[in-house]
Image: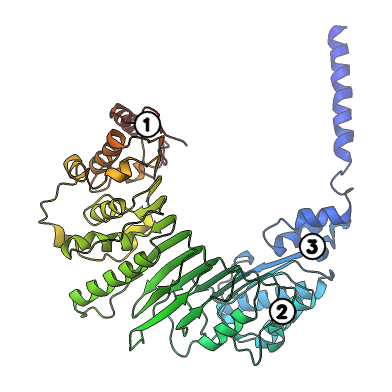
Amino acid sequence: MVEAKTNGTSCKRGSKRLNSFEKDRISSLPDDLLCHIISFLPSTLLAVRTSVLSKRWHLLWTHVPNINLHQQDMPQFYNCQQSCEYFSTLVDKTLKSYSSSKVNKFCIQFPSNFIDSWARMDSCVRFAVGRDVEDLTFDISGYGLEIVRFPDDRGYSLPQFFYHNSQLRNLKTGFCEFVPDGRVSWSSLKDLSIAHATLTDEVMQNVLDGTPLLESLKLLSCIGIHRLDLSLNSHLKELVISGTVLPYEEEYTVLEISGPHLMILEILGRWRKKKCLLMNMSSLIRASLDFEVLEYYPCEKRNDFFERGRNFVKECLENVHHARILKLGSWCIQVLSTWRMTNALLSPSLSRKCLILDVDSFGNHYLPGIASLLCCSYNLHELFINMCPDARYRQMFYLESEFSNSDDDFGENYWTSQKIILSHLLLHLKTIKISSLLMKSKSRFGHERVFAFLGFLLKNASVLEEMIIYGSRVGRGVSETEVLNMALKLISFPRCSPRAVILFPY
């Protein structure tokens, strides 16, 4: 009897569950809420596929306020022409079926071979502008930042009606040309990103004059600009400049940048016969120098190349020395490491509170540069070292054999000899973070130099609060024994600060 009763109770519970599943609670939601949910899908193609769920969902995607058309969402075709035709059909059908009168975000990334159809691209821009788009991405490049540019490279010319828009807030273009006939008027634009474009100083100034509320400007692999005067753009707080490879350059040129209101500055990419001249950066808070200067020809004199690279890095550092946060890429740190041969000194910084460094090892070509930066950072509170695997694929500033006969000892004795110079650092440093340390366990230098450096800091930093070692998770070639041994070794080091703790977060 008990068993039968139990079975009867379970059957009732099961039937209740079935009844609850029979009700489609999601489809009973209001259309506006359903469209809001669908808008979080990464592409319009996925939104269209929701129409197979039920008749109720058949046209919901046409009211979603976001349109995202990406080439990578398409099926794979062996024939390039088929891929282009498919994408063209997808664009045409999407725009024709779309029924909402308002588009918040319109993102379209054309295949590179799609640029022959100017009329279709004009219709896309007209469609977006006609629906008061606020966030527009129009990218035809299909390339990364390190594209090789030639004089005849020309992208899609934006139509003239596009230069007058009071609704646009965010604009991102790739391989599009800016050729306004008259004054640009983007009165609401706050974020502008231009990639792979040929610009002029006049056009760029026209854009800056027509964007009074602009807060962020990114110029990625753009050519033709020689001066950026941002003094009248009081709202502009962030500037990102990425260099590009120009194999046809004949003369050395300079890009002058005046940014008294800038708070964030990033100089990235690959530069050859061009460099940035920074002026009036008095409001700068964060600066990132992650660029490299390429040799113009393999036969270029090495001494001339060294001098050019050193000057570029030194001038940038001198103009951003008052920034509270400084990030340096691997190539720039290598340049600093060679300065010990030229008796060059960095200007001391009392403002710098945080230093972020990208390296791929603790080799000869990094440690002297790291020491130089620490010596001139008089009030440093935070030190982040990213053991970046991508750094090894960068061009080396010099051949390692040039320092192969060096008598320098980069172990504990090296850092102890720097103690007097680093005395100011040891009085203020509170946080140390180092990432992907064990990912480098098979590197040529092992961990000896890393432990020597970290041990020196633990032993002498009087106000240190935490040392955080990221990337210590077991797996990906890292054994549990390696993690344990490293933890035990670091914990065994004497600590000057009684509050210092060593953390190994996952």
Q: Is residue 55 above or below residue 14?
A: below
Do we see residue 435 in this rendering?
no
Residue lying furthest top: 1
Residue neighbourhood size for the residue with mark 3, other residues' Cα within 10 Å, grouped as few (<14), some (14–19), many (≥20): many
Q: Quadrant of the N terminus?
A: top right
Between 24 and 170, the residue placed more toward the observer is: 170
Residue type, numbered disc 2: Cys
Identity of the residue drawn at 90% across and 34% down: 19
What residue is disc 3 on? 64
Q: How is the image coloured?
A: rainbow
What residue is disc 2 on? 124
Tag 2 and tag 1, C-beta contact below 8 Å? no
Residue neighbourhood size for the residue with mark 2, other residues' Cα within 10 Å, grouped as few (<14), some (14–19), many (≥20): some
Label 2 or label 1, whichever comes before in sequence order: 2
How far separated are the C-alphas under marks 3 and 1? 49 Å
Residue lying furthest bottom: 181
How far separated are the C-alphas under marks 2 and 1? 55 Å
Residue type, numbered disc 1: Glu
Quick one: SS at disc 2? helix
How far separated are the C-alphas under marks 2 and 3? 17 Å
Do we see residue 162 in this rendering?
yes
**Dot label at residue 480:** 1
Place of residue 198 in the rendered image (x, y in percent of width and height, measured from the top left): 51, 85
Place of residue 110 in the rendered image (x, y in percent of width and height, measured from the top left): 61, 75
Place of residue 162 in the rendered image (x, y in percent of width and height, measured from the top left): 70, 83
Quick one: SS at disc 1? helix
Tell me which corner region of the image, top left, top right, bottom left or bottom right, holds residue 87: bottom right
Decide if residue 160 is on the left or right side of residue 433. right
